[in-house]
Image (cartoon, rainbow, N blue to C red):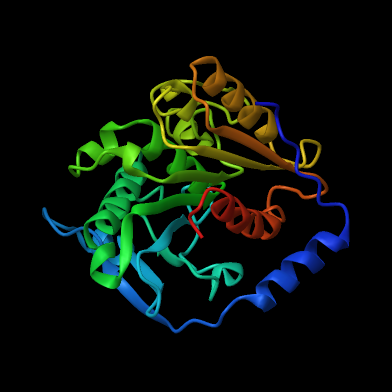
Amino acid sequence: MKLLRFFTVSCSLFIIFNLTAAAQKTNTYKSEESILYRETGELTPYMKERCQLELYYPEDIDDFTTIVWFHGGGLTAGEKFIPEQWKNRGVAVVAVNYRLGPKVKNPAYIDDAAAAVAWVFNHIEDYGGSEDAIVVSGHSAGGYLASMIGLDKKYLADYAQDANQIAALIPFSGHTITHFTIRSERGISGTQPIVDEYAPLFHVRKDASPLFLISGDRELEILGRYEENAYMYRMMKVVGHASTFLYELDGFDHGAMAVPAFELTLRILKEIGLN
């Protein structure tokens, strides 16, 4: 499939999005905060503090789609939140906190992400959702976590889950090489690219879940982030993965790209029958 560039240079796009949002039916939503997603094993005080999620879900929709959302912050900062653009849009959102460096080191962040997604698979039907409609997304470091647990199957396997159960992976501007914080932990410069077992690129495979890579403008992104995602797109195609797509949000830098990407995510879900 031809690489798709998603142009957002016209305000008409946002007018369309706003009209679409206004036309949405108003659903009844409920929020449950501070859910501890690690249910087994000995928990440290820091795990009890950070290994929590918030569940925002519709009470009047059956078998709803759930987006698991990982915040950004370079694996050293950040706090869970429910994106405003996804509120009352017919989907549930699970916002996840995870442990941060330097208090922990790799692969603790990735393991936390897998534990959180496993919790969703184990419990979302209790709230009316479908385990067949779980989408994993995140921005920057969160996008990296989404890609890692979706492509390296061992992390979810540790929680008796199959990564291929994920209905779609939608990372926003995430590293596809080894994350710069993980490189820093080894004394490697952030300008030295590494592709090892902690790089999503290392785990390209034909049978992975559908992958929708979203990047900011290649001239405005940080540290070649667009080019990383473009290479990931190409290598997934090389191994025969038919459902990898790449979107470039022209005119938006690394931080600002999240706002149009939230709306683009809803459009993607609609197009693949998940919203």
Q: Residue furthest top?
A: 238
Instruction: Name the quadrant containing residue 15.
Output: bottom right
- Position of 15 with respect to 182 (left or right) is right
Answer with the quarter of the image where residue 30 lies.
bottom left
Give the residue drawn at x 57%, y 26%: 232
State whether residue 218 is above or below residue 49. above
Along the line of sight, which residue is nearer the eye, 143 or 125?
125
* The furthest residue to the left: 41
Q: Is residue 274 visible?
A: yes
Please state the horizontal and vertical placement of residue 261, each as a whole percent of the image.
65, 54
User: In percent of the image, x 38 and y 54: which residue is there?
Assistant: 133
Q: Position of residue 58 (x, y in %)?
A: 41, 76
Query: Which residue corresponds to the image point at 74% horizontal and 73% vertical from the top-left?
Result: 19
Of the 4 image quadrants, the one containing the N terminus is top right
Residue in the image at 37% along x and 70% along y: 55
- Residue in front for this viewpoint, 36 or 131: 131
The tally of labels here is: 0
Q: Nearer the viewer, residue 103 or 220?
A: 220
